[in-house]
Structures are given as C-alpha cells and as structure tokens.
Amino acid sequence: MKSKTWNEKFMQGVFFTAACASVLAVALICIFLFANGIPAMKEIGFLKFVTGERWKPGNNIYGIFPMIVGSIYVTAGAIVVGVPIGILTSVFMAMYCPKQIYKPLKSATELLAGIPSVVYGFFGLVVLVPWIREAGRGLKSMGLIRSSGNGNSILTASLLLGIMILPTVIGVTESAIRAVPKQYYEGALALGATHERSIFKVIIPAAKSGVIAGVVLGIGRAIGETMAVIMVAGNQARMPAGIMKGVRTLTANIVIEMGYAADLHREALIATGVVLFVFILIINFSVALLNRRKERE
Amino acid sequence: MNNQSTFGQKMKSYMKHPASFFTMLLVMLGALLTFTILIFLIVYILAHGVPYLKPSLFSLHYTSENASLMPALVNTVSMTLLSLIIAVPLGIFAAIFLVEYAKRGNRFMGIIRLTTETLSGIPSIVYGLFGMLFFVNTLGWGFSLLAGAFTLSIMILPLIMRTTEEALKAVPDSFREGSFGLGAGKLRTVFRIVLPSAIPGILAGVILAIGRIVGETAALMYTAGTVANIPSSVMGSGRTLAVHMYNLASEGLYMDQAYATAVVLLILVVGINALSSVIAKRLTRV
C-alpha cells in the first residue's frame, strides 16, 4: 500500500513538471532572445537601430526602420485583402450555407489552414508574381503608373498573405457569429428586418469582440509569416517606394542574412527578431484582453 | 434558416430591399472567392507537378542532377517521430495535470494558460532563432535533426496540450467516480479509465501537430540545417521536405522538381488533415 501512495506522489510530480515545461520554454525564449539581441541594440544605439532608414551591414550601418515599415505595409495589405473576404465567408458559413455542403466546406477552410507556407509561397512565386508583373506593365503602358516593377512587390505579398490569413479570420469569426444568441436574430426578423439586415446590423455588432479577435490573430499570423513573404516580396532592404515595388519584412531580414552573418551583423539580426517578438507579444496580449472582455460579456 | 421561405418569396423580398439583395450577393461572392482560390491553388499545383513525379525524384541519394526528394522525405519522417517522442508525453502529462490534478482557479493554472497561449502565437522564425541560439549554439549540438526536433516540439506543445485538455474534459465525471468507487486510485483511474476514453481526441491533436511539423520551414533552416541528404545520426544536419522545397524554389534551377515536391507536400498535408478529421468524427460519434 505504501509503495502505491509513493507512486501516486511521484507521478503527480511528473505531471506537474510537464505542466511547467511551457512556462520554462517561454522563459528560455525570452531570456535567450533578449540576452543576445539587446547588447547589439545598445551598441548600435536603440533609436538608431529602430528608426535608422539604412541597412548596410557591409558599412556597419544597421537601421531596421525600412523592415518595420515593410512588415506593417504587407500586414495592412493582408488585412485589406483578407478580412473582408474572411468575414463574408464566415457569414456565409454560419448563416447561409446549406447543411449538405457545410461539412465539405468546413474541411476546405481547415485545409486552407493546413497548407504549408512554402507551398503558398511557391504558388505566389509562379502565379501571383507573373500576374502582378503583367498588370504593372499594363498599367504603365496606359500611363497610370510610372514604373511597373518586376512583380515582386508589396501588392503581391499583401495578396498572398491575405489568402493565408483567411482560415484564421474565418474560423474565429464564424464561431463568434454562432455564439450570438438566436433570439437576437429572431427578434430582428420579427421587427421586419431582412435576413441580411439582421445579420449585419444585429448579429455582427453583437459578435464584435470575437470578430476583432479574429482580425488581430490574422495580424499576428501575417506579421510573423516568413517563407511565403520571402518568395514574393523582392526583399530589398530600403524604404518601400510604392505598392508595386519590392519590400523586405522583419522576418525576411532574419532568414535571408542569418546564413552568412557574423559578429555585430548577426547580433543585429537577432535584435531584429527581438523587435518582431515584441510586436507579437503586444498582439498576443491584445488578443488575451479581447477574449477576457468577451468572457465578461 | 434557409427553409423558412420559398425561393419566390425570397426573391420578392429582395426586390423590395435591394440593399439586402446586394449584401447577399456580396456574401456569396466572398465565399465563392475563398473556395475558388483554394481549388485553383490545389488544381494548379497538381496539374503542373504531377507530370514531373518521375522515379528519379525518389532515388535514395540527392545529387545535383536528380534533385531527389527522397532523402528529404526520410528526414521529414525522422524529424516528425523525434518531435513527437519529445512533445507528446510532455503535452499529455501537462494536460493531465491541468485537468485531473490542479485545483480550479489556481493562480499557477493561469500562468500556464498564459504561457501556452503565448507559445501558440509565436511565429516560427522566432522559434528558429531561439533554437539556433539555445540548442545549436549554447548546448553545442550544431545544425542537427535533434536541435530541429527540440525546436519543433516546443512549437507543437501548446497544440497537443490544448487538444488533450479538451479530450480529457470531454470524458464524463461518472467514469472517474465509477473507477474510484471500485477502489482504484487516482493514478490508475487516469491511466486505465480516463486516458483510454480520450485517445481519439488526443490522436486528432497529434495528427494536426504532424501536419505542422511537415509544413514547417522557418524554424528548421537554422536549427536542422539544409543538407540535402540523410544524416547518419540525429546529430547530423538534414533538411525536411518543406525546407527542400524552399531551396529548390529559391535556387530557381529545379522548378519542375519544385512543382513535383509541392505535389508531394500537398498530398501529405491533405492526407494528414483528412485522417485527423476522420478520427475527430469518430470521437463525436462515441
């Protein structure tokens, strides 16, 4: 009998230790990133690093402002492309979709989430980049824009990321819409509103915090996306000059140069990761806040 | 909600409310766009890739002539197994603690929940950086399958924890009470009664995790490295299928092989997703 209680206690300890693993992992990630990134920021000068407009590792000039702006541009572009389509699709899934085709469509959105980012990137490379290149040439010949670019551009990256955040936006928004009590919808109908009016004037406002949480999660996914962006964005480390021009994001900066970087250059890349990490922490924190508010409602 | 009125009535109502009609069109258009993009992507890659699925692509050694994906496929399998060996027991044990042992409303629970949420939001490139700094440099493992597997196992840990938690919570309390009533201890109840009934849910989560491992690139480039052949041990560097695919596409010399590799990746991911939903469906039937 005694050995059994010892066993119980031992296993409880094991379970507890396992539960601590995630805490340990987060602590280690923070410690290692900050310990390796902050010295470089100090050496370069924090303001110079974050607001410097030139990135020239060869001349020891490390300013990541172009990459910060680049990340913000492509993320904003992804939101403009992905959020309206995502919300409309989730409205369709929750309020319009006939029962017979709901299941296949639902697994289709899950599949959209499961496709690896390299495959998206490859698709962007072989399909979207040539399209945008042709469109740019067309617009240029019509005299609408001055230079057409080569297809690797903010626009291309935004389109691709917009597609990639669709499953995130659809999933969260759909469950938020479904969580709205049915009486809201029925009440609106009883007051003479049409199906559409009830959805967009009553249900969506009621599901607002869930919808916003979906959008913020989408922002997190877009800003952290690496491989797909690298394959279509052109990656020039300078201030973006227009949506048909190339851009480099924070994530791309790390992957492209880490392979051959050394010393301060390498540390500056890790510091780039720290800046990205801080962005992500802010986004995570706001999602957590939104969820808490939703629970209170 | 669609069968409340006939088609004719609906059309009449739409004639009276053109704004509603327009909104409905917009919703349909949005949904159509989403699913068209998905179908177009899959069909495009299949159509361009399947003709290049040649036997030379599956030879056991990578050379610059055949750009074989077989070594990368083998590496993917070993990477998946290694990561699962690390992450699955850890994730399941952690979930057992959270569901079966911890007291509700415990402050420690809140901390664990917060950290797992943080982990699931961290982008893969940050995991890659951390893996490089910690496993590759600090622990001195070098670019190796093991460093890659440890990095990935941290990445999939929150996924496994969450799905296992949900599966455990879905087991009715009467099972536990019955087991206690028959004189079984807590540990015996957990392993003999609760875990077996939660297995389909856990399995569905594990399969989703496999999908993430197979598709991962950014976290592996600077942890497992990019050597194109099968390493002799877990301490050797080797690239998985997704990393292989990225290299082919970015070098631009092997576009045909890149298409074929994309097909293999896509089929793997579709298969894994289908398997997961079949298992999850079995769970809901019980």
Image: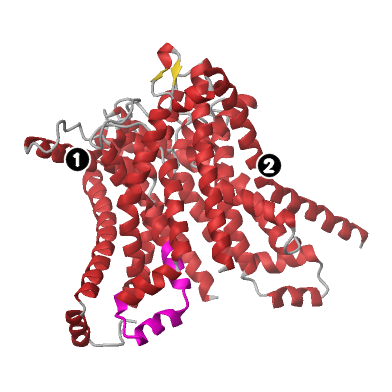
Q: Is B33 left or right of A223, judged from the image as shown?
A: left
Secondary structure under the numbered disc 1 in the rendered image: helix
Give the labeled residue for mark 1: A132
> Which quadrant holds residue B52?
top left
Residue most extreme to the left: A142
Give the labeled residue for mark 2: A24
Q: Residues within 10 Å of mark 2 (few under 14, many from 20)?
A: some
Specify whether disc 2 shares its chain with disc 1: yes
**Secondary structure mostly seen in the magenta stretch:** helix
Residue type marked 2: Leu
A164 or A51, nearer to the observer: A51
Residue at coordinates 70% horizontally, 75% vertically from top-left? Answer: B173
B286 or A47, nearer to the observer: A47
> Which quadrant holds residue B2?
bottom left
Residue at coordinates 39% horizontally, 37% vertically from top-left? Answer: A71
Residue A88's place in the image compared with A219, above or below, is below
